[in-house]
Amino acid sequence: MNDTSLASLQPAVWRILDANFDRAREGLRIIEEWCRFALNHQAMANECKQMRQELGMWHTPEIRAARDTARDVGTTLSHPREEQRTGIEQLLQANLCRVQEALRVIEEYGKLYSPAISSGSKQMRYRVYALESNLLNYRRRQLLANSRLYLVTSAAPDLLLRVEAALQGGLTLVQYRDKQSNDTDRLAIAKQMCQLCHHYGALFILNDRVDLALAVDADGVHLGQQDISIALARQILGAQKIVGRSTTNPEEMERAIKEGADYIGVGPVYETPTKAGKAAAGIEYVQYAAKNATVPWFAIGGIDNTNLDDVLKAGAPGVAMVRAIMNAENPTHAVQFCLGMLNRVPQVGFRL
Ligand SMILES: Cc1ncc(COP(=O)(O)OP(=O)(O)O)c(N)n1
Ligand SMILES: Cc1ncsc1CCOP(=O)(O)O
Ligand SMILES: [Mg+2]
């Protein structure tokens, strides 16, 4: 192409704009379907729809007319990564990226066609960034609120295999708790466990360690009463991440909720060798939480299939377990059994 005058470039610019309007609208439609049918989230679905419609208005007949699919050398190009999505998170992420890229292309090439479309496209790209953060945040919180069984890990030679087996049973919430490894090992394990959980669509939380949670991009952190404040953890991790707090009595519960905990641990319900020497808070504290907790909560401490029914009868919407899953002969079956019992009790609707 020797003639580089604007007029001679026009057909190529139109073809680029045409392809990218399609790309952006298709990507938005994929995200919209998830917001609408999976999350039932009207505002986010509507935001996708509005943006699709605005793109439709910019996608003029003259741009559409430039389409030349037969001569498009890119139609048969693909990358193996495009053909495989390991989970819904990755699928949404890939499509958000696709929309952002397409809008960036429209913004740049639009400068050769219409400054209004170019700057409109830039504004829309920022709207897509906001949508991305709302979507991931909402999904995280919804998954937390719907999780009724929480696996807190303990040391095991086949730790990741055990966690994977538990995930295969339908677990959606995992906390990596490791009181004995060195930091190099902790970081390596946390990375792998985080990937594993996300592969199964589950949330991954770090016990105690905000720094490691940040390093591996975990979904959040679980803080004890002696750990840093919830506000500081949020400042470090960002507003999108989950911060949980242990509570052993009504005062700690009230404070944790007031300070903005996304969820709380309630216990130890019973004495447990996993936290030897810690006094039991008792089933009465579970009954108290059932009446007063306004955020998702998990009864924890000495719970197994011999007493799960009592804990549920006391009003727990969810439970956290270490030994009952980690030491089970078959963690998949242990999870399935507990979820079966938990799902017999109607779900409590916490406000997201
Ligand atoms: C869900 C949940 N609840 C409580 C705890 C206990 O946390 P903490 O008091 O910090 O004790 P350690 O787990 O750090 O020994 C928890 N980990 N998870
Ligand atoms: C971490 C923790 N926090 C309160 S009790 C507890 C341990 C629960 O372990 P188990 O389920 O094996 O009794
Ligand atoms: Mg702790």
Image: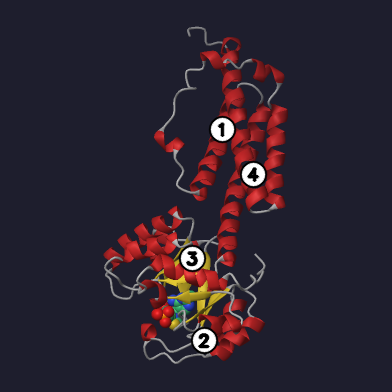
**Whole-number angstrom distance, CA of label 3 to CA of label 1:** 35 Å
* Amino acid on which the number 1 mark rests in the picture: Ala
In front: label 2 or label 1? 2
Residue 33, labelled with which disc? 4
160 over 301 or under it: above or below: above
Disc 3 under 8 Å from ligand 1? The reply is no
Q: Of the two numbered discs 2 and 1 on the same chain, state the one appearing first in sequence.
A: 1
Label 4–label 2 contact, CB within 8 A: no
Picture residue at 62% right of the left edge, 78% below the top? 258
The residues bearing labels 4 and 3 have C-alpha atoms spaced at a distance of 25 Å
Q: Nearer the viewer, residue 230 or 222?
A: 222
State whether residue 228 appears in this view: no
Indicate the quadrant where residue 114 lies. top right
- Which numbered disc flags the more N-terminal residue, 4 or 1? 4
Judge from the rendering whether residue 289 lies leftward or rightward of residue 97; answer left or right: right
For discs 2 and 3, the disc positioned in front in the rendered view? 3
User: Which quadrant holds residue 331?
Assistant: bottom left
Would you say the beta carbon of the disc 4 residue lies within 8 angstroms of ligand 1?
Answer: no
Q: Is residue 35 above or below residue 138?
A: above
As helix, strand or loop, the secondary structure at mark 4 comes to helix
Gap between marks 2 and 1, in whole Å? Answer: 51 Å
Q: Amino acid at mark 2?
A: Thr
Q: Mark 2 Cα within 10 Å, few/some/many (few <14, many 20+)?
A: many
Tell me if label 3 and label 1 are in contact, CB under 8 Å.
Answer: no
Q: Looking at the picture, which amino acid does disc 4 mark?
A: Glu
Q: Earlier in the sequence, mark 4 or mark 3?
A: 4
Q: Earlier in the sequence, mark 4 or mark 2?
A: 4
Mark 4–mark 3 CB contact (< 8 Å): no
Q: Residue at x 48, y 67 (%)?
A: 336
Q: Which residue is mark 2?
A: 248
